[in-house]
Amino acid sequence: MTPTITAFAQSPDRGQGLARDMRVRWALEEVGQPYEVRLVSFQAMKEPGHLARHPFGQIPTYEEGDLVLFESGAIVLHIAERHAGLLPDDANGRARAITWMFAALNTVEPPILDLQTAKFLEGDKPWNLERMTLIRERIRHRLRALSVRLGDADWLDGGFSAGDLMMVHALLRLRLSGILDEFPNLAAYVTRGETRPAYERAFAAQRAVFIGTPPPR
Amino acid sequence: MTPTITAFAQSPDRGQGLARDMRVRWALEEVGQPYEVRLVSFQAMKEPGHLARHPFGQIPTYEEGDLVLFESGAIVLHIAERHAGLLPDDANGRARAITWMFAALNTVEPPILDLQTAKFLEGDKPWNLERMTLIRERIRHRLRALSVRLGDADWLDGGFSAGDLMMVHALLRLRLSGILDEFPNLAAYVTRGETRPAYERAFAAQRAVFIGTPPPR
């Protein structure tokens, strides 16, 4: 059964691939699972039809027969558990890859999202610059630890996994800030993720929505 | 094999159960799995021995034979997948329960943690009060949606699950703020969680560390 995901009808990042549907698209491309996309407007996201699928009125959602899921982390894990390619075969390696998914979402991403919140929701405050500086230091604190752990490995724990997928996507949001370039091994890690063919297909598909042409598939 | 978890040797919340080892203790109590606890000092958390287990130098960690995990979400999911009691039997219900775990950690908890960051790390700033007000409104925004979804149900999706465990624990941190009491059904939901015998045993065990007596088991 072909799953259907939701994505923004109007791309807030102008097709840069930072919206969270990108994580789900990327996972589906990695495992070779075709999917349908239903675009939702900002207005429709707050209406009962969409809220029944996503109680917090966000994207992405994932529908597959009777099953409706939300939260990009949960959706990527669901895909990874049902298809080969995103989790190792051995039980311990699997548990560690899932650990990296949670680390990406709960330890690395929060200060990165804070930077965005400060920029867009508190940008008019006289204290914004001072706060942005504090947040950037919190991001560096996390990235220093991540950089040490990654070392000169290609991926966080053996082969590419759903943990790398989530981590690369969380880090991508830092590119314009310049912080990522302070950690060359992390910058190279992100580039390794972005140049995977599955990432490139997912990126092109979400960008096609912004450009307004049908996705190339 | 009895797993070993790590917890703070010096409880930052004076035994109120807000540290993240509480989530793991609670999950282990729900499934009836005995465990060992190794207490780590703030200094030891930054040393190579602990960093090998937790690259970000935090607690909890989980060790079971050769397997070492970190991130409370990943550990609770690992426990829930290997024991009965924290995930429904049917595949779709399971995926939905896991979705609520991610929702607790990535959608509901971030603004709640922001309130704590603002209080402890930015409390001396002249703009702290203004920012706390912004954060409180962001928390209310999430809680309104959660309150609507919960309605008059006991738990988020059928019976108690690992999703409820994570959500209740994320919400608990709000108690002193007064915000939780603005949503009576969420306040009652948290109370339902806290009065589960497994929660009470876990709470007593972590509190015993603070009080300095051996855990009651």
Image (cartoon, coloured by chain):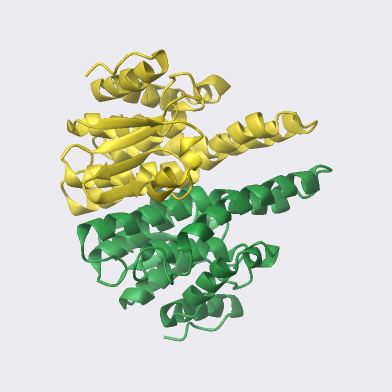
Chain colours: A yellow, B green
Q: Residue at point 40% right, 66% down?
A: B5
Residue A48 in the image: x percent, y percent? 45, 47
Tell me if B127 is positioned left or right of B153 in this view: right
Question: Hey, which residue is sitting farthest right in the picture?
Answer: B126
Residue B170 in the image: x percent, y percent? 52, 60
Along the line of sight, the residue nearer the viewer: B155 or B74 = B155
Along the line of sight, the residue nearer the viewer: A132 or A38 = A38
Work out which quarter of the rendered image holds the N terminus of chain B and state it: bottom left
Which quadrant of the structure image shows residue B38?
A: bottom left
Q: Residue at point 27% right, 52% down?
A: A95
Along the line of sight, the residue nearer the viewer: A217 or B199 = A217
Residue A52 in the image: x percent, y percent? 40, 50
Instruction: Answer above or below: position of B75 versus B195.
Output: above
Q: Residue at point 62% right, 62% down?
A: B174
Q: Would residue B217 be seen by someone viewing this image from the given angle?
A: yes
Tell me if B209 is positioned left or right of B182 in this view: left
Tell me if A140 is positioned left or right of B196 in this view: right
Which quadrant of the structure image shows residue A80?
A: top left
